[in-house]
Amino acid sequence: MKRKEDIRGTLMKAGFVIVIVVYLAMLCMRGYAKDVPIEKIKEAVENAGIPKGVQELKDRDLRRYYGIDGSQNKEYFFYKADSSMNVDEVLVIKARNSEEVSSYEAAVKTHLENQKKSFEGYGVTQTALLKKAYAQAEGSYVIYMAGENADKWKSAFEKAVK
């Protein structure tokens, strides 16, 4: 009788350890991204297609739209539509540490929420595109991708860093 209890206890412990290992592996893989030069990622995203009327912006614009000081971190690229009625936009920024990841991720999420509020009630097409936008951290990178090409950009980004 005691032997059955010992076997049952051992099996329960082994099962618990397996569950913990699988859980930890999933957590580690969720935010994994290789350390890739930002220029390679930019090239992959550009090859996925930058629509007409979308142009590359610089430090001043990064601060204006996201509150991020681009002069402190040159490891980014930022494209935004010329028209204020167009939500096509892509930002990929490489953080130097976990504090920057958190800060940049909060900035892109805030930007997305502000965009949704801006188009709420009258920009039906834009609102639908913003609901499918990406504003998240991927390893040491933080991304914001919205618009018609958001899925293509995200796929190109993932292929470049995974």
Image (cartoon, rainbow, N blue to C red):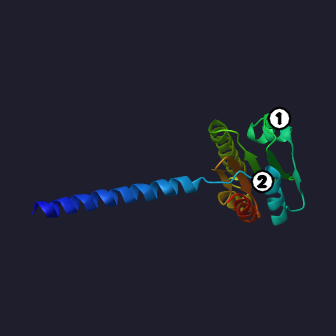
Q: Which residue is labeled 2 in the image?
A: 90
Left or right: residue 153 versus residue 134 is right
Classify residue 29 by image quadrant: bottom right
Q: List x then y, in percent, for residue 153.
A: 75, 61
Q: List x then y, in percent, for residue 53.
A: 90, 58
Residue drawn at x 79%, y 50% is 38
The earlier-in-sequence mark between 1 and 2 is 1
Classify 116 as above or below 18. above
Instruction: Mark 2: give few (<14), some (14-19) or many (20+) Cα within 10 Å.
Output: many
The quadrant of the rendering that contains the N terminus is bottom left
Classify residue 9 by image quadrant: bottom left
**Residue furthest to the left:** 1
Q: Label 1 is placed on what type of residue? A: Ser
Residue drawn at x 15%, y 64% is 4
Q: Which residue is labeled 1 in the image?
A: 71
Left or right: residue 101 versus residue 3 is right
Work out how far the residue at label 1 is from the one at label 2, CA to CA, in angstroms.
18 Å
Residue in front for this viewpoint, 38 or 153? 38
Secondary structure of the residue carrying tag 2 is: strand
Does the rendering let one see residue 39? yes
Q: List x then y, in percent, for residue 27.
A: 51, 53
Q: Label 2 is placed on what type of residue? A: Val
Does the rendering let one see residue 49? no
Closest to the camera, between mark 1 and mark 2, is 1
Classify residue 124 by image quadrant: bottom right
Q: List x then y, in percent, for residue 72.
A: 79, 34
